[in-house]
Amino acid sequence: MNRGGCAGISGFYRELSKQRNCPRPSDRDKQDKDLTKGTNLTDAAVFRAQGIGKSYPGVRANDDVSFSVEAGEIHALLGENGAGKSTLVKMIYGLVRPDDGEMTLNGQPHQPADPRAARAAGVAMVFQHFSLFDALTVAENIALGMENPPHRHALSARIAQVSQDFGLPLNPARRVVTLSAGERQRVEIIRCLLQNPRLLIMDEPTSVLTPQEAELLFATLRKLADGGTAILYISHKLDEIRAHCDRATILRHGRVVDSCDPRAHSARTLAAMMVGGEMRPIDRSGRRTGEVLLQVRALSQPAPTAEGTALKGVTLTLRAGEILGIGGVAGNGQDELLAALSGEVRSAPGTVLLEGADLSRLGPEGRRVAGLLAAPEDRLGHAAVPDFSLTDNTLLTAGARKGLVRKGLIDRPAARAYAADVIRAFDVRTPGPGTTAKALSGGNLQKFVIGREVMQTPRVLAVNQPTWGVDAGAAAAVRQSLLDLARSGAGVIVISQDLDELLELSDRFCALNEGRLSDPVTTEGLTLDRIGLMLGGAHGMEVAHP
Ligand SMILES: Nc1ncnc2c1ncn2[C@@H]1O[C@H](COP(=O)(O)OP(=O)(O)OP(=O)(O)O)[C@@H](O)[C@H]1O
């Protein structure tokens, strides 16, 4: 089979389309349209769901969901956190069984018992969290995921060929531990492409990518779609969906509430369709900058691991009522800086001071008691224990400040009541405090984690990527809570790769580049060009909608 260059790809896909008996996108208009039940059920549909339902204890995650994805289409699945998107794609990929309804793939009933069966039927999926072994090479990782892997040399040659065909540079012999997030995602994508999928599902693929890597991904997806593959695309980035998707199905509370051409709508309208109403703009008013709360003085730390980043003389001052934004491309010391602030990593005496008191040698608990709190980027596994209930997860950080643990004894009713308060105040969609953290959708867990810290009324709160993977409504709620915290007189440090977020929230902005923090500049009037210069030629930041 000819797989060299673009001409090769279209030939390859023509062949594939014949084998699969699936029409190419240009044939779509010739198909009879069956618009029953308000969904676009056409003969060009590669995938079709009809009346799909799925319940979890206390939650109707999917309810009577009908929609279809056509050959050659990049189809967005939109919805607030907890709307049921992941549940739906997990059913298509055989990870979860539907309670009701039917699915078809290329006209055949699709009832995969497990992911292996889904893959055999032609469904591939790239998850938000990668499932790669760091110590193994790219080729070894790919072989592990294959039912019948070819011989090592043959596999490496195929990987190299696919990566060349699709413009996804990747060396099969590289160890995964040395790869960036974008390169790791390429491993997952190439693993999928080797399966020749009819339907490719992508769950929030760009949240870990630089803008350049995201552009490369879209070019790949478009090539695949042009070859007849159907693509189901989950993202919270509405501008990205407007730029790259052909159609969108919108879920709210587990039901399909709308279907549209996202290119014909503004991001604001799409957000309103998702939440079922207009969103309130952020309120930045009423803040006053006061006394110095936090001082970090010439903080240097060696890199914690071979892949980590050393902190080099980080110096900053944070005042009461102020939000300091720290931008930078992932991997430039963000995690290390947060660990140095939270106390997970202690530093030399005199390097971290809160209201004049030296906290440098204190661990996380001591710093919390003093009033310095932190929320790390990874919510499942770092900020929260997946198998613990929300009640138990409050004990992890709020035990001392909220009086939930006294003289070594846990006050369970108090912990449950605090978890319930956080759930209520931060609109966490969950049946209750007894639910395990891992059962929450990503955005709802993030609201819980941020709420758990904010409601402890810290003097200083440091957060890393506070709205990663969070829908527009929940992101606005999290950002507003940080502004409200600053209004109450606390100081807030927001570390983020989302420039829009930093420009929206922060009073002053610093760039973190290879473990060095730039001098702060006032955010008001700051241009993207200036920020680019501050980043010191680092390989680009996420500028979702400047
Ligand atoms: N294994 C589970 N056990 C219990 N409830 C679950 C489970 N998985 C999902 N849910 C619940 O089902 C609902 C839908 O969740 P789902 O993860 O499908 O939403 P989502 O739209 O993908 O959200 P997000 O954008 O935050 O990832 C949520 O209320 C969630 O808490």
Image: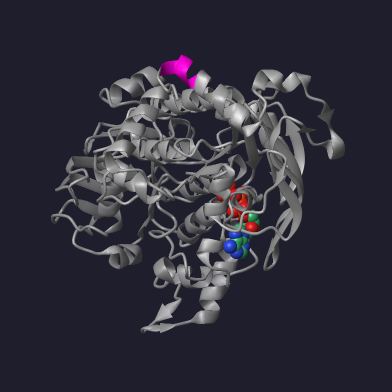
Closest to the observer, 425 or 545 = 545
Q: Is residue 275 left or right of residue 376?
A: right
| Residue in view at x 75 percent, y 34 percent | 259
Q: Report whether residue 546 is seen.
A: no
Look at the image and tell me in which quarter the N terminus lies: top left
Q: Report whether residue 47 is seen.
A: yes
Q: Magenta part mainly helix, strand or loop?
A: helix
Closest to the observer, 257 or 336 = 257
Residue 426, image x, y percentages: 59, 56
Ligand 1 quadrant in view:
bottom right
Seen as rendered, the residue at the extreme top is 7
Residue 501, image x, y percentages: 47, 35
Q: Is residue 130 left or right of residue 31?
A: left
| Residue in view at x 55 percent, y 47 percent | 120
- 487 to 452, vertically: above or below: above
- Magenta residues, as a range? 5-9
- 61 to 237, vertically: above or below: below
Residue 356's quadrant in the figure? bottom left
| Residue in view at x 54 percent, y 47 percent | 119
Q: In the rendered view, how is the structure colored?
A: one colour
Q: Is residue 448 left or right of residue 538?
A: right
Residue 7 among magenta residues: yes
- 414 to 215, vertically: above or below: below
Residue 368, image x, y percentages: 34, 63
Residue 335, image x, y percentages: 30, 48
Residue 445 among magenta residues: no
- 300 to 44, vertically: above or below: below
Residue 263's quadrant in the figure? top right
